[in-house]
Amino acid sequence: MSTPPGSTTRKPLPAQDKVIIGAYYHVLAQLATLSALPDLIAARISVLVILVLLPALRQGRWLAWATLAAAACGLYVALAAGRAVSLLLLPPVLLNGFMAWVFGRTLRDGRMPLIEIAARAMRGPGAQLDDDVVAYARGVTQAWTGLFVVLAVVNLVLAMLARPAGLLVVAGFDPAVSVPLSAWSLFANLLSYLLIAALFAIEFVVRARRFPHQPYSGVIDFTRRLAAQGHLFRPAAVGHDPENGRKPQN
């Protein structure tokens, strides 16, 4: 299929570049929290916004660029008002809430669970899954949804109770129970990701024992194949099978 005249084909951002940007973000997250320096906070928020918008920015979508401009203006206003630290509390809540929605919305009636979509995509077009695999995929999708809901709620509670600059304190309330900002940072920037990694590892081991015949050769090959299916985790693709976006009818 030829490329239309005047159009350009943009290659996806290499996985290693995404890893580098992601690692840079988490280093900034911890440094910004511990130092409370406005410049570091601004850098952390900027990296996060760019990470989220990067695919659309590289495609030249005007809405993504408009969102980036609006985010920059909002960041400037927050910094000028002395609310920079409070900005750090929101991303963990929003990101985990978003991921809970990404997984959870595929559990609705008539939808194909996200893990089932990924399993079919890894096996190629027209792949058929056994009933026990389909049931297992739904259970794993539920597990991921539950984990992200818990992470979002815990991050929200810690953000509300944090001192100084917690959400309740900023709103003018004096919480009877409070936690240091370092405790929030420990959970948001470290423990949350360890829990995600733990579920990933445990589920991989359980799946390997229950279903030993897989289209990948190990955890590295599985991770590589999963990364290649990253488009399935975008909102526009979630809840859709490769053919008609609905769960196949028997």
Image (cartoon, helix red, strand yellow):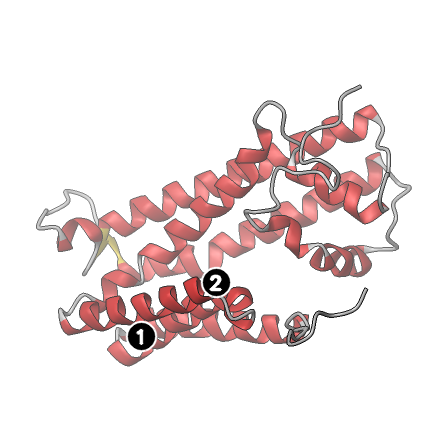
The residue at which mark 1 appears reads as 42
Q: Position of residue 233 (x, y in %)?
A: 61, 49
What numbered label is drawn on residue 213? none
Q: What element carries label 2?
A: helix
Q: Is residue 203 above or below residue 183?
A: above
The residue type indicated by label 2 comes to Val
Q: Is residue 30 visible?
A: no
Marks 1 and 2: CB-CB under 8 Å? no
- Nearest to the observer: residue 119 or residue 245: 245
- Tell me if 66 is positioned left or right of 179 in this view: right
Q: Is mark 1 on a helix, strand or loop?
A: helix
Q: Earlier in the sequence, mark 1 or mark 2?
A: 1
Characterize the local packing of mark 1: few (<14), some (14-19) or many (20 or more) Cα atoms within 10 angstroms. many
Q: Which residue lies furthest to the right in this view?
A: 213
The residue at which mark 2 appears reads as 52
Characterize the local packing of mark 2: few (<14), some (14-19) or many (20 or more) Cα atoms within 10 angstroms. few
Q: Which residue is drawn at 28% across and 60% down?
A: 181
